[in-house]
Amino acid sequence: MATYLCLRFTVTSGSEDRLIAELWSLGTLGVESVSPADGTCHQVLAYFEEPLSIEVSRRLESSAEWPEARIEGAEAVPAADWLAVYRRKARPVELGSGFLVDSREPDGSSASGQTGRVLLRIPARSAFGTGSHESTRLAVELMEGISMEGLRVLDVGTGTGILAFAALTLGAREVIGFDVDRAAVLLALENCRLNRLSPRLVAGTVDCLRAGPGFDLALVNVIPARIRGDLASIVGLLTASAEIVVSGLLVDQHDSYLRELASFGLREKRSRQSGEWVGCLLERAA
């Protein structure tokens, strides 16, 4: 039976989001957070494929990069569908001003009708983006403020496909999404069937797309460290008047990331914050 490596962290109160963001940047398969009753510290469980890569091992062993967290232990755990219990207990949640996301098992039941919102069926699997994380919610809220009718949209790191579905529902003419995780794209294609929406989804890097400008809007709900090397290629795919929605960054990363994006000719139009997370809408500078 296949096994995964479960790393157990203790993190000081208030630093949990930063640790989780770092773990996602390292390629964790999933994160579980346990909050103690006294609120003094948190325990975070992170799951990785075995064996750990040399780079991941090096960063985990570097105490300088983890000043507010420490590894308490590691153990091998058998492969399992860890989200099965969550799917059974989950209830539809509102997303933005116009969507309702149902992350339960697709059993044919309907969750729409009483709210007047557009229902998106996104069963909780291994791919990121069921509408519960602040970064996804911020991205959708920013998208709802854009006149989407007729736009050609690029969805970077599509995950479950949730932002691609939202863009099509909001009036986008065409959406092309890609993700380096092949399993995520397979799950997203299943979600296409569940939602009867048809973005064009590709497994691979940005290099698999045809070169040259052509997208009116890019959706980048990806932790900055994981997308940094592809920013130039992504911007190169945008039209001269294009906009870009960026989410997945912590509040204290906001200013430095804006400076980095400015070097690619992008400037911020507006931003939204939720807890420790921030999302922003940028445009091509003249």
Image: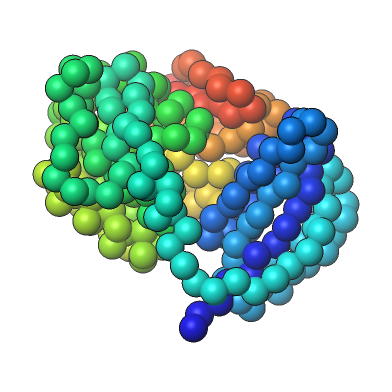
Q: Is residue 216 visible?
A: no
In the image: residue 177, left or right of residue 56:
left
Q: In this orientation, which residue lies closer to the viewer: 140 or 46?
A: 46
Q: Position of residue 151 (x, y in %)?
A: 21, 31
In the image: residue 278, left or right of residue 251:
left
In the image: residue 195, left or right of residue 48:
left
- Tell me the quarter of the picture where residue 46 sits: bottom right
Quarter occupied by the C terminus: top left
Q: In this orientation, which residue lies closer to the viewer: 131 or 41?
A: 41
In the image: residue 107, left or right of residue 26:
left
Q: Is residue 173 visible?
A: yes
Does residue 181 lie above or below 96 as drawn?
below
Q: Residue sitting at 80 percent across and 38 percent down? A: 41
Q: In this orientation, which residue lies closer to the viewer: 32 or 88?
A: 88
Q: Position of residue 270 (x, y in %)?
A: 48, 16
Q: Residue sitting at 34 percent across and 54 percent down? A: 178
Count numbered badges in the picture. Answer: 0
- Tell me the quarter of the picture where residue 261 sits: top right
For the view shown, which residue lies furthest in the bottom direction? Answer: 1
Give the colour scheme shown.
rainbow
Q: Position of residue 38 (x, y in %)?
A: 79, 31
Q: Residue sitting at 63 percent across and 45 percent down? A: 33
Q: Residue sitting at 81 percent across and 59 percent down? A: 72
Q: Position of residue 280 (x, y in %)?
A: 49, 25
Q: In this orientation, which residue lies closer to the viewer: 155 or 10?
A: 10
